[in-house]
Image (cartoon, helix red, strand yellow):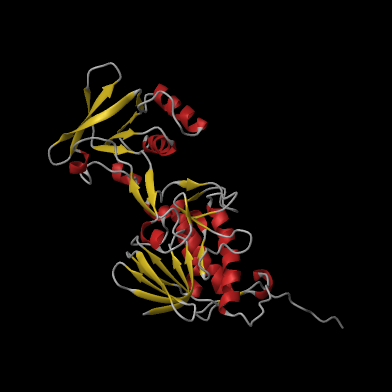
Amino acid sequence: MITTDILIIGAGPTGLFTVFEAGLLKLRCHLIDALPQPGGQCSEIYPKKPIYDIPAYPEILAGDLTEKLMEQIKQFEPGFTLGERADTVEKQEDGTFVVTTNKGTKHHAKVVAIAGGLGSFEPRKPPIPNIVDFEDKGVEYIIRDPEFYRDKKVVISGGGDSALDWSIFLTDVASSVTLIHRRNEFRGALDSVDKVQELKDAGKIKLITPAEVKGIIGKDKVEGVSVVRKGEEPFIIETDHFIPLFGLSPKLGPIADWGLEIEKNAIRVNNALDYQTNIPGIYAIGDVNTYPGKLKLILCGFHEATLMCQSAYKRIFPDKKYVMKYTTVGGIDGFDGTRKEAPKAVVKKID
């Protein structure tokens, strides 16, 4: 059985930053994530997309943010159980918890922090009869590595930010990009819509609206799609890849059966103090939680993780008084024996 102070369910940005804040309090962490690598959505769904609202980074790729967070927490030596899903939780008589994964791995912790983002994701698939037959054979619901589409013909379907952003991005990668949307109006950011129009006028994007992809053509892989424009006969577009970007449907999974208070597929927490759930000792931080005024932003998850760790410390050490010191003053002592601190001022005696 794996033993730790704080068991973090979810190894996305909020979960990773929790390790840092817990480390400052001398609390050890272990993380569980169903994905095979840390980073959550940033690594799995959009590693090459830029993020613009991380403090001190005017722009940073989602994958690079994960790397920076992993570098930041390295000296606190977190443990990871990756590729496994947290399935059950059992509260022990002493108030601690045993969490077991779908593969039977047991974890014993004094505190549980659910930082699972929006939960597990399933793509929203268009109602095309044979689409399942071409999954991983030219049909992709998520773009993980844009270079995969280098010099290929790509058809993207959708009308939101993801469809617009990737259509714009892939114009510099793919040999051709076609964007199909069932309406003339898009739901994305206005500047993205304007950029797509500019690229259309420049002949770099083929825009087909209002229209829908109704069928996929090919034998062993995608060779084309059948498109129906309103009021017209179907026509074929040759392509190597069809990417329907209709969003992802979040699901809490087994956590929804843990007896937590759930509101609109999110875990309700006490935001007036420490983001604790209705079960003492279990917290929920980041996009997975909800409370009045909640904003689903990474930087908000960082804030919630900081306050949660302070509360966890008091729960684990009720008789100890923690005096907060700024890292610029107290430095950082890692569990690996390393220390980070500001250079000391040189004192020189004058005779």
Q: Which residue occupies 67% across, 70% down? A: 326
Of 88 and 82, nearer the camera is 88
Q: How many marks?
A: 0
**Residue 272, position as x, y percentages in the image:** 63, 59
Q: Is residue 144 visible?
A: no
Residue 194 in percent (x, y) is at 48, 27
Of residue 334 and residue 91, the one placed in the foreground of this image is 91
Quadrant in which the C terminus is drawn: bottom right
Q: As drawn, which residue projects farthest toward the left?
A: 219
The location of residue 201, given as percent across then percent down, is 41, 22
Q: Residue at x 37, y 24 (%)?
A: 203
Determine whether, in the image, residue 199 is placed left or right of residue 327: left
| Left or right of residue 329: residue 257 | left
Q: Is residue 150 above or below residue 185?
A: below
The answer to whether residue 213 is above or below residue 105 is: above
The one nearer the camera, 55 or 343, is 55
Q: Residue at position x 30%, y 66% from top?
A: 102
| Image: 4 above or below 299 | below
Query: Which residue shows up at 26% across the image and 16% down it?
Result: 232
Front-most of 325 and 168?
A: 325
Q: Position of residue 334 (x, y in %)?
A: 54, 77
Q: Residue furthest right?
A: 351
